[in-house]
Image (spheres, rainbow, N blue to C red):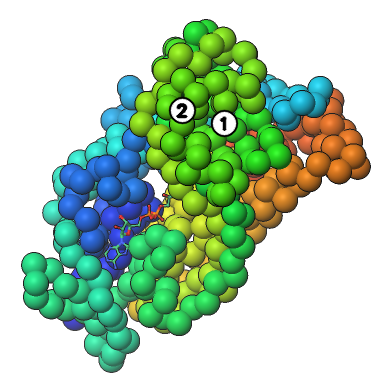
Amino acid sequence: MSKDWDYDIFISGAGMVGCSLALGLASTGLKIAIIDATQLKQSDKTTFDERGITLSLASKRIFENLGLWQALQSSSYPIKQVHISEQNRFAFTRLRANEMNVDALGYVVIASTLGNGLRKSLSQHDNIEFICPAELKSFELTQQGMRVTWQQEGSERSARAGLLIGADGSCSLTRRLAGINTEQHDFKQTAIVANVSTEKRNQYTAYERFTPHGPIALLPVAENRSVLVYVVNSEDADYCLSLDDPQFLARVQSETGRRLGRLITVGVRRSYPIFYQNAVRQYQPQLLLLGNAVHTIHPNSAQGFNLGLRDVAGLAEVIKQSLVNGLTLDDVRILERYVDNRTEDQKRIINFTNGLAEHFYHQQIVSNLLRDVAMIGIDSLPFLKKQLMQLTMGMLGRQPELVRYSMQQEIV
Ligand SMILES: Cc1cc2nc3c(=O)[nH]c(=O)nc-3n(C[C@H](O)[C@H](O)[C@H](O)COP(=O)(O)OP(=O)(O)OC[C@H]3O[C@@H](n4cnc5c(N)ncnc54)[C@H](O)[C@@H]3O)c2cc1C
């Protein structure tokens, strides 16, 4: 530790992003505390529930380079093809892994499996300390560093850190206490997520269908099983959740067609409100926001965590380089450089997901025709299609080293 701090880095939030950052920095030997309001094993109530999370190729590479992929691989399911269509329209497009010379465009992992893997990996590092369950309460920038205060087992505790990371989700207390405003948009949509079993094998294909009430995705998790992400207008969400299983499946089937044959069974349905939120500032001295705390985006193309993980990779890279160059963690140039490096990718993904959310739900004739042309255009213009695939794989533009370096030498 370069200064008289209790911790070099204090991470608020042991969700997917907070844990990934701790893993990304584990090898530096920096002393890291990671606090979370929930019990570590309380998988059903935390970010690490039974949702299927699509990891992009870039995310797979990051985890591979951090030594986590090896533990996730056996429980991940490859997506070799994505079939994109629109309800009641003739045009569709297919994105295939072999067009990009890769084994898979992405992988579906159950969030709880990812959480267990991350936490198990972190428990092997002595320089990482979990403070759970405990709630961050306040922080203050002092001459001796960032003084962080939290509540644990009924008493208040505090420590000084070189850098505070707010990875505490969409309602981030860190962001609110820092007085950082957000731009917001409520899509008035709710995602209903559940496992479904299907009559036909999915053959490693993910289906994404756009409908007037939002996208419907079927993500493969086993030969005859997919994770359904069914987005509806929020006013219809309670009704959809109240249907019994056969009624719910009949409704989904009527909108998704029979490419996977009959939808046979559906597991527990969970619902998530959908909104966009972007912090107007990502950092201030000795404080940085990450993950949903800084940008919460529409799940229409499964980009939220993937973007957050590339931010984690970018931050870990800048911190490592800066320490080698003799900077200390309280040096604001570290955060400036990180934001400079990452802004382009963040803007691209935010524009893409907001653009999809905006354009696919208009039912005017002109919008319908434009979307047909877009689908056909993507299929017949290889350059455009390659760009789209690189974007969804997290490989477009300048990316952190952990993304650029592949152990398997895929060509993208
Ligand atoms: C339906 C749906 C499907 C999605 N599918 C995908 C997908 O396929 N691929 C993808 O990349 N992304 C997907 N996403 C997005 C992804 O879920 C998020 O990007 C990701 O969960 C963000 O993680 P996070 O760690 O930033 O925040 P969170 O998961 O919200 O974690 C924040 C953590 O902070 C803790 N915390 C909060 N306040 C405090 C406090 N005061 N003190 C201590 N701890 C605190 C919480 O307990 C929590 O553990 C999806 C989102 C939805 C809604």
x then y, percent, for residue 19: 30, 52
Classify 10 Å Cα crowding around label 2: few (below 14), some (14-19), many (20 and above). many
Dot 1 falls on a residue whose secondary structure is strand
Q: In this view of the protein, which residue sits in the foreground, 116 or 101?
A: 116
| Residue under pointer 1 | 217
Q: Is residue 244 left or right of residue 140?
A: right
Where residue 270 appears, x then y in whole percent? 40, 40
Q: Quadrant of residue 41?
A: top left
Q: Which residue is mark 2?
A: 227
Q: Amino acid at mark 1?
A: Ala
Residue sitting at x 59%, y 54%: 188
Residue at the image point whose x is 53% and y is 47% from the top: 190
Evaluate if marks 2 and 1 touch, with contact meaning CB atoms under 8 Å apart: yes
Along the line of sight, the residue nearer the viewer: 152 or 232: 232
Kind of residue indicated by mark 2: Val
Mark 1 neighbour class, 10 Å CA radius: few under 14, some 14 to 19, many 20 or more: many
